[in-house]
Amino acid sequence: MVTTPFTIHRTHPLAGGDQALEGRTAGGQRITVWTGRPLFDAVGDHPGLAVPLWIGTHKDEEVWIESRPAPWGLLDIEGPLGETNALDLVCRVADALASLHAMGLHHGSLQEDSIVIHSDGSPCLIGIGRRQATAAEDVQCTLDLLQRLHPFDNLPNAMTSASGLAAKLREMAIERQHTASDLASRLAAQGRPIATEEQPMNIEAVRVGLSDEVQPELGSDTIGRGILDRWAPMTEDSDFTEDPTETGARIQVEHHNHQQLLGRITGELHRIRRELNDGFEPPGSHFRNHLVNEALDPLPVPNGLVHGPVHNPANSAEQTAELSAPEPTNPSPIGFDDTTGTTGTTEGESAIQPSVLTGLLWATVVGMLLAGVMLLAAWLIISGVF
């Protein structure tokens, strides 16, 4: 704990004989000192909610310090609020409660002394977490507060949520054709509250929440442990001390690290699931090996291609023509000597096929018949002339 100096400016009596101290820190921050301990370490980030700052002791009594964002308290306003101001103020209180309830937290002591007013007329709830409560109790306290500020008829009944109450109050303001609230101008004309006392106070306090304070005398390192000893799991009851800075911070850091590891594991699982569900899947290793090791197609060579088992199932010594094929668009004549060469002979057989010989014989016979017909025609012509 660290000795923290404060200056108390006003003392506010509370219901039940308790009291709250209003003051400032050495840096000028406005604060409220409450007795006891808060139920919550954090209440969220909302302009209508004060946040706990420190917990400590004063004169052997537990106290906690909360921020006090606004200078005026609701009890500091002079004169009645009026219907418009009261409805606008309580509607904003319901908005702040809705944000608090959304985090699973509750106020527990919603009274006039737990509401401070900003210079623009908007309220801020203080003393959050002083007592246990439920959402329904907070909503009912808000309705009771509205009736005390200005009596209304036909208030909404059976409201169980603060957000629903805020919406209903806005509907009432629209139906009654209310103008804008003039609470800000009233506060400006009234002026800031005057301090009634100047009382210095020193409180042995520590900040609420995680702390980066170096903890001394954590014990000697053991085998397998080193710089992360503070975050190692606690296995003995002796690890817990009465110092809230040491014990509380270690528990919170352990929980934070545990949640962080779970978040990283969950993120990896989501990434793997997205990849598996992706429509495009790269080929497997077996398919890639098949493509790499596949035999290449045979390439043509000047002497032709050796027949494989499909073309030569008898495995005879046979190959295609060694001569290159002539150009189809400009065929070159082949001499008789060339045709009698090695043009695909197999075991001494004639290179000329029987179908070719039959065609040549028929061509010779037809030619001879045509020649005879022409000679006969020529003879008849000559005979007729002479």
Image: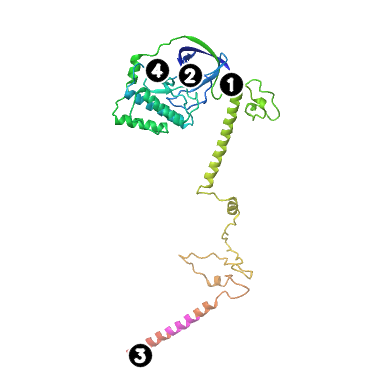
Per the image, the residue denoted by label 1 is 213
The answer, for residue 386, to whether it is visible in the render is no
Q: Residue furthest right?
A: 223
Q: Give the answer, above or below, for where 380 lies relative to 229.
A: below
Q: Which residue is mark 3?
A: 383
**Magenta stretch: includes residue 367:** yes
Depth-wise, is mark 2 or mark 3 nearer the camera?
2
- Label 4 sits on a secondary structure element that is helix
In the rendered structure, are the residues bearing label 1 and label 3 in contact, judged by CB atoms less than 8 Å apart?
no
The amino acid at mark 1 is Glu
Instruction: Find the residue positioned furthest to the top.
Output: 198
Please tell me which residue is depicted at 47% across the width and 65% down the height of the picture. 328
Q: Give residue 263's position: percent from left, percent from top.
A: 55, 36
Label 4 neighbour load within 10 Å: few <14, some 14-19, many 20+: few
Disc on the earlier residue, 1 or 3: 1
- Which residue in the structure is indicated by mark 2? 16
Give the colour scheme of this rendering: rainbow
Tag nearer the camera, 1 or 4: 4
The amino acid type, in three-letter code, at marker 3 is: Ser
Give the mark toward the camera: 4 or 3.
4
- Expressed as whole percent of the image width and height from the top left, the position of residue 293 reads 61, 54
Q: Of marks 2 and 3, which one's residue comes earlier in the chain?
A: 2
For marks 2 and 1, give the CA distance: 37 Å
Report the span colored magenta: 361-370
Task: Name the N-terminal-most of marks 1 and 4.
Answer: 4
Distance between mark 1 and mark 3 Cα atoms: 143 Å
- Residue 166 relative to residue 298: left or right: left
Give me the C-alpha separation between circle 4 and circle 3: 156 Å
Say which amino acid is labelled 2. Answer: Gly
For residue 138: magenta?
Answer: no
Q: Earlier in the sequence, mark 4 or mark 3?
A: 4
Report the disc number at residue 75.
4
